[in-house]
Image (cartoon, grey):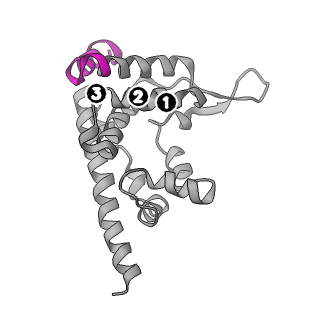
Amino acid sequence: MSGNTVNYAVNAYRHFNTITHHKMLVMHYCFKAGLYKQGLLHDLSKYSPAEFLVGVKYYAGTKSPNTVERELKGYSGAWLHHKGRNKHHFEYWIDNRPDGDRKMAGVKMPVKYVVEMFCDRIAACRVYLGDKYTDASPYEYYDRSHDHYMIHPETDRLLKRLLIILRDHGEEKVFAYIRARVLK
């Protein structure tokens, strides 16, 4: 086998393990929230050729291959594919405002997808930070980035509330809150 073939096979193996580990973590958290169907179906598009092959090509291990693709090409085709098929991403919910001015804006997300997005953020931080993960990590990541997000204000408030509860009180408290107050 040539060096490129070996690297491709190694990257395929590592990328498959990374996305499967992430998917299993999200499933665990979705189950804790009571979102069983979403937990099972989460991120299946990552196994499609449009996303998986890009993930293998740009696999880094410490950050999303979509970030690497974006840095090199100026955009990420895999991310555009992914966000257009997965309702737990706020980017899925961007549309023209209904007032006729044709400006783009974030649309209020259904609560079950906000909760899945919250679970996704915990899992992504756990996968990419490894032993450096703390319950504050998902909030810190969101806080560093959210000022440029096109997200509906109510969606933003709910996600921040969940991230703050996680940061300040831990997983058990936030998932009890989600089951008792958010998804009821």
Q: Residues within 10 Å of mark 1 (few under 14, many from 20)?
A: few
What's the residue type where badge 3 is placed? Answer: Asp
What is the secondary structure assignment of the residue under circle 1? helix
- Above or below, 76 against 92 in this view is below
100 with respect to 44 (left or right): right
**CA separation in Å, label 1 and label 3:** 15 Å
Place residue 127 in its image quadrant.
top left
35 with respect to 109 (left or right): left
Query: Which residue, given by chain and number where applicable, does mark 2 sit on?
Result: 140
Please tell me whether the stretch drawn in magenta is mainly helix, strand or loop. Answer: helix
Give the number of the disc on residue 144.
1
Give the residue furthest to the right: 101
Query: Of label 2 and label 3, which has the lower sequence position?
Result: 3
Q: Position of residue 161 (x, y in %)?
A: 40, 16
Q: Position of residue 154 (x, y in %)?
A: 52, 17
Query: Foreground residue, 17 or 143?
Result: 143
Range of magenta residues: 167-184
Q: Magenta includes 183?
A: yes
- Above or below, 4 against 152 in this view is below
Residue occupying the point 48% across, 37% down:
89
What is the secondary structure assignment of the residue under circle 2? helix
- Above or below, 74 against 184 in this view is below
Query: Foreground residue, 87 or 151?
Result: 151
Asked if the residues shown at circle 2 and circle 3 are in contact, with their CB atoms under 8 angstroms apart, the answer is: no
Residue occupying the point 36% across, 37% down:
120
Query: Of label 1 and label 3, which has the lower sequence position?
Result: 3
78 with respect to 137 (left or right): right
Query: Which residue, given by chain and number where applicable, does mark 3 sit on?
Result: 135
Q: Residues within 10 Å of mark 3 (few under 14, many from 20)?
A: some
Q: Position of residue 48 (x, y in %)?
A: 43, 60
What's the residue type where badge 1 is placed? Answer: Arg
Task: State the quadrant of the C terminus.
Answer: top left
